[in-house]
Image: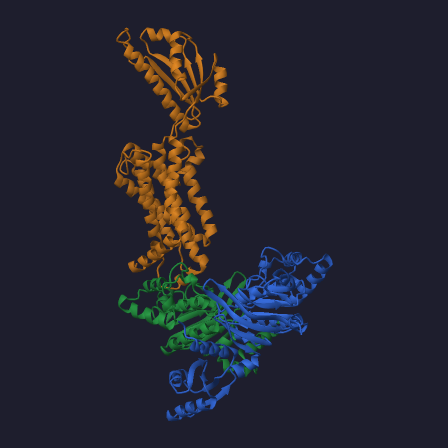
């Protein structure tokens, strides 16, 4: 391998990227757009969450409690009901998002120093909104508790949490928050960069006729592929930095684990993803075909089957089996590990190993598949 | 004599035609005339102003100044009338690849608003002339370069124009196909159609009745192929045969009176100011070197020789600023 | 010693035989013209000889290297200019040249002088900083040639290099080729323009993948009793086609 040639190819590719503002914009704006899009979609304030109420107690105490929801700008009480059937129907048809059920003995419990179990049923299908709504409900209850407790010095109340919220989420038990999504987005962004930008680079040369010239020179396949790889690797890493910074300072996603591990693992995944892009480009020989193949084989599966959009354990068994073939599955797990739990490649060594295998295999394949022949 | 009748003698006539794009003069006050039924070659290197001129003549571009008529219509005012009465075939053959041969012809019949009867008649004539009877239901994409070219010509003359403009019609087509194409052109000219053709292939220009050479927006030579080779070409061409010709090129080029020497296979073509003086000095050089087995003959210059030496002469007289 | 030699070189694409049992020998320092109509097999022959396409059968050597087994070392000694403009239109003239200088590992000590010389005789010096995509047809071809010559190849393959090039640029182009011949560079030239083929030392006439004649233009004209290669070409192909139909 001749480093001078690798440098020449990389430099040429760099000039071409710089001179084509569209591809450069694509490369640098995609992370910003995606993160802002997802980030804001998740952190938008919501108001007037529809709330249905069944007050089985119907005493001064229970009405007082409900008043707290009524006075909050976050909730809009759509009505009072007296049976589960009607409430269930409301939830099913999406007429309400939240149902609050106060037990018959609400006031009795309250005055006898026992914890009152108030039931809260939540439509979780729009998980983002539901998360936020639940947060509001919890804070309303908390405020009420605090108020009661403060009064307790005058009364004989000793229970610090007189009301306990028995919350139940229907349809989608597991919330995802932006803290959960932003790390996953890094994998998506890297896949897009690899799929859309890299997949074109070799195909474009075949299409424009420059490849015929190039393969008649002594340049080696490995030099050519590595040279083409480098500038896109740089763009991918810049995108990583953009994503981390935006996540941290604009959307306040905490990074609990090691930044170094985050970069090492991302570099590993990026290597595999870029190699996949180059491999596609080598096989396709036309830009249109290459971009379609890239979307079909790398971008869509990553988006749908990696656990980013849908939880893997909710998928049918057969589909779950397929997800093991999606490298982003492992990467997302590692990313979330690093971001949320401060665990990384040592604790998640099986995933890290899979990523390693993916990137080594893919880069070997890309170099191997590229032939300095017309056919 | 009034101006109208004077112009009607010529199929195309322009006087001091000029086109500028900003500070750049693409066509610099050119004047020429094309007679009816003539094959008129408009030659020049890329960027000389060929396409700009042909576009002005076809009513696709308004001249900056000057005057002219095409088929009796004023090129400054009657551009739409001109478009209806001429045929134009560009180098890119504006055919639809995903339509069949017949569908392409049908499409252009519509453009030229032929009646149903005319359309059917012309379709048969055009297909026959192009020799594509066997491919009439085939997609145009599947035709070879030569067939496409003839179909494009057919589509350009569906409305039986009296004047046809061909912009580099044979670029990238092989010799046999080109020969066929030119026989169609000649046959059309024989029926009285005026043909205005641009090309930069000089061997093709031999087929023209008359030609002009345009360079940097200026006409630098005009005449019949014969006139171009005799009157216009001041230099003579000598064909030199000598064993080991390649060794001799530099030596011949350095002789006085020899302007240029180039290897042609095993012979050398030299450009000299005067055949007699030139051959004398060349022969003297051979004798001095003790070479016996040689010959020096004056040959007719090719149009390419004329073309190149006219341009070199122009460049010498008009050095770039 | 022949610089280019093939024995029964054949390449098929499915049912189509693009190159059919080609046997040629080209000595050092010769300019050889491969002429024939579109689709005759000229480009396929070029690709076989430059090691970027493998033959179906037969063998070939270029500058002593086998075109299949030594395809990569073969590429050190040759230069190939494909029919389509093979340079980067979004790079400038000088960037293209430097790129190919790097690819061929031209030492820095020789580079500046070489580039200056190549730009000089192709008259491209004033256009050094221009994007290649904005050059005229003739200038593009000269740039292609300059890039191909940066590593001083021993054998030069040119596939229809003067297609779409005006006569003045064509003259410039041939002047460069003649200078190369003086340096004993072997040139393999393909063209569909017969007046241009007259300039080659020997020409091979290829039709439907078969080499129908291979000789000096003069001999071919003499043998067919024609005045130009174009006439000779038409007559030889006509003869071949009528013999085949009998």
Q: Is residue B231 left or right of residue B242?
A: right
Residue at the limit of the structure toward the front, as seen here? B1
Can you say whether A56 is above or below A257 in the image? above
Residue drawn at (39%, 35%) of the image: A38
Q: Quadrant of the N terminus of chain C?
A: bottom left
Can residue B241 be seen in this snapshot? yes
Q: A96 or C214, which is in the foreground?
A: A96
**Count of labels shown?**
0
Q: Nearer the viewer, residue A59 or B133?
A: A59
Residue sitting nearer the eye, A323 or A214: A214
In this rendering, would A327 be left or right of B194? left
Q: Residue visible at 46% across and 57% down?
A: A207
Q: Which chain is orange?
A: A
- Residue A275: percent from the left, percent from the top? 37, 49
Identify the hue of chain C: green
**Residue A266 in the image, given as x and y percentages of width and height:** 32, 43
Q: Quadrant of residue B196?
A: bottom right
Quarter that holds the C terminus of chain C? bottom right
Above or below residue A144? Residue A226 is below
Q: Quadrant of residue C134?
A: bottom left
Relative placement, left or right, of C183 versus B80 is: left
The picture places residue A210, in percent across and down from the top left corner, at: 42, 60
- Figure check: B83 above or below B314: above
Residue C1 in view, yes or no: no
- The blue-tinted chain is B
The colour mode here is by chain
Q: Position of residue B55 (x, y in %)?
A: 56, 64
């Amino acid at each position: 391998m001749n480093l001078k040639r690798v440098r020449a190819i990389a430099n040429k590719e760099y000039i071409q990227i710089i001179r084509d503002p569209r591809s450069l914009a694509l490369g640098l704006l995609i992370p910003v757009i995606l993160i802002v899009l997802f980030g804001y979609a998740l952190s938008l304030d919501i108001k007037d969450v529809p709330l249905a109420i069944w007050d089985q107690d119907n005493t001064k105490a229970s009405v007082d409690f409900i008043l707290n929801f009524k006075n909050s700008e976050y909730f809009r009480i759509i009505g009072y009901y007296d049976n589960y059937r009607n409430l269930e129907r409301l939830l099913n048809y999406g007429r309400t998002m939240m149902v609050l059920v106060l037990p018959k003995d609400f006031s009795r419990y309250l005055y006898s120093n026992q914890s009152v179990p108030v039931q809260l049923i939540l439509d979780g299908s729009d998980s983002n909104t539901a998360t936020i709504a639940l947060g509001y409900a919890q804070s309303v209850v908390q405020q009420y508790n605090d108020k009661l407790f403060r009064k307790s010095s005058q009364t004989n109340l000793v229970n610090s949490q007189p009301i306990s919220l028995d919350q139940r989420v229907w349809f989608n038990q597991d919330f995802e928050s932006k803290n959960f999504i932003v790390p996953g987005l890094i994998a998506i962004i890297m896949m897009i960069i690899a799929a859309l930008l890299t997949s074109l680079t070799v195909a474009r040369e075949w299409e424009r006729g420059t490849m015929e010239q190039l393969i008649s020179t002594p340049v080696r396949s490995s030099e050519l592929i590595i040279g083409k790889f480098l500038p896109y690797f740089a763009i991918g890493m810049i995108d990583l930095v953009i994503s981390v910074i935006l996540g941290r300072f604009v959307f306040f996603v905490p990074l609990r684990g090691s930044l170094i591990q985050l970069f090492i693992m991302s570099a590993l995944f990026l290597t595999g993803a870029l190699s996949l892009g180059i491999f596609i480009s080598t096989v396709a020989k036309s830009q249109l075909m290459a971009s379609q193949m890239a979307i079909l084989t790398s971008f869509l599966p990553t988006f749908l089957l990696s656990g980013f959009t849908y939880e893997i354990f909710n998928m049918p068994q057969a589909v779950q089996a397929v997800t093991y073939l999606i490298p982003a599955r492992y990467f997302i797990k590692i990313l979330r590990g690093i971001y949320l739990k401060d665990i990384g490649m040592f604790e998640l060594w099986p995933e890290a190993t899979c990523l390693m295998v993916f990137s080594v295999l893919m880069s070997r394949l890309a170099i191997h598949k590229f032939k300095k022949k017309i056919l | 004599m009034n101006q109208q009748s004077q112009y009607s003698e010529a199929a195309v006539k322009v006087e001091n035609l000029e086109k500028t794009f900003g500070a750049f003069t693409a066509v610099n006050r050119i004047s020429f005339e094309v007679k009816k039924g003539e094959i008129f070659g408009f030659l020049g290197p890329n960027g000389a102003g060929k396409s700009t001129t042909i576009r002005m003549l076809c009513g696709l571009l308004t001249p900056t100044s000057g005057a002219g008529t095409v088929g009796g219509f004023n090129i400054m005012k009657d551009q739409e009338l001109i478009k209806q009465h001429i045929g134009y075939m560009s180098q890119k053959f504006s055919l639809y690849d995903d339509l069949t041969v017949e569908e392409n012809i049908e499409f252009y019949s519509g453009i030229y608003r032929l009646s149903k009867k005319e359309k059917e008649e012309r379709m048969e004539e055009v297909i026959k002339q192009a020799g594509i009877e066997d491919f009439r239901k085939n997609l145009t994409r599947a035709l070879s370069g030569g067939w496409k070219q003839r179909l494009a010509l057919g589509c350009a003359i569906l409305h039986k124009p009296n004047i046809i403009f061909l912009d580099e019609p044979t670029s990238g087509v092989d010799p046999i196909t080109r020969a066929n194409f030119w026989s169609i052109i000649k046959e059309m000219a024989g029926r009285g159609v005026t043909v205005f053709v641009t090309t930069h292939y000089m061997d093709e220009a031999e087929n023209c009745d008359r030609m002009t050479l345009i360079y940097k927006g200026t006409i630098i030579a005009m005449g019949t192929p014969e006139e171009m080779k005799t009157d216009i070409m001041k230099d003579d061409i000598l064909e030199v045969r000598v064993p080991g010709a390649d060794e001799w090129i530099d030596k011949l080029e350095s002789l006085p009176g020899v302007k240029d020497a180039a290897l042609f296979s095993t012979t050398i073509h030299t450009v000299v100011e005067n055949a007699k003086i030139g051959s004398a000095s060349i022969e003297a050089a051979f004798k001095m070197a003790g070479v016996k087995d040689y010959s020096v003959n004056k040959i007719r210059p090719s149009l390419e020789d004329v073309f190149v030496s006219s341009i070199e002469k122009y460049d010498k007289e008009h050095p770039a600023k | 010693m022949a610089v280019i030699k093939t024995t029964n070189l054949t390449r098929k694409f499915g049912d189509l035989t693009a190159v059919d049992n080609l046997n040629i020998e080209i000595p050092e320092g010769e300019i050889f013209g491969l002429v024939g109509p579109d689709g005759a097999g000229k480009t396929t022959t070029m690709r076989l000889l430059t090691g970027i396409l493998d033959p179906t059968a037969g063998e070939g050597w270029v500058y002593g290297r086998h075109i299949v087994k030594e395809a990569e070392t073969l590429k050190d000694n040759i230069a190939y200019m494909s029919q389509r403009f093979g340079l980067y239109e979004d790079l400038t003239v000088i960037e293209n040249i430097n790129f190919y200088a790097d690819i061929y590992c031209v030492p820095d000590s020789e580079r500046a002088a070489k580039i200056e010389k190549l730009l000089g005789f192709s008259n491209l010096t004033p256009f050094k900083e221009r994007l290649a995509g904005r050059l005229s047809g003739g200038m593009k071809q000269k740039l292609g040639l300059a890039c191909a010559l940066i590593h001083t190849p021993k054998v030069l393959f040119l596939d229809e290099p003067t297609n779409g090039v005006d006569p003045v640029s064509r003259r410039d182009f041939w002047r460069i080729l003649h200078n190369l011949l003086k340096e004993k560079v072997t040139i393999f030239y393909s063209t569909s323009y017969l007046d241009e083929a007259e300039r080659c030392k020997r020409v091979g006439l290829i039709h439907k993948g078969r080499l129908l004649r291979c000789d000096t233009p003069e001999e071919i004209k003499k043998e067919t009793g024609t005045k130009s290669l174009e006439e000779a070409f038409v007559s030889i192909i006509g003869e071949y086609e009528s013999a085949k139909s009998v």
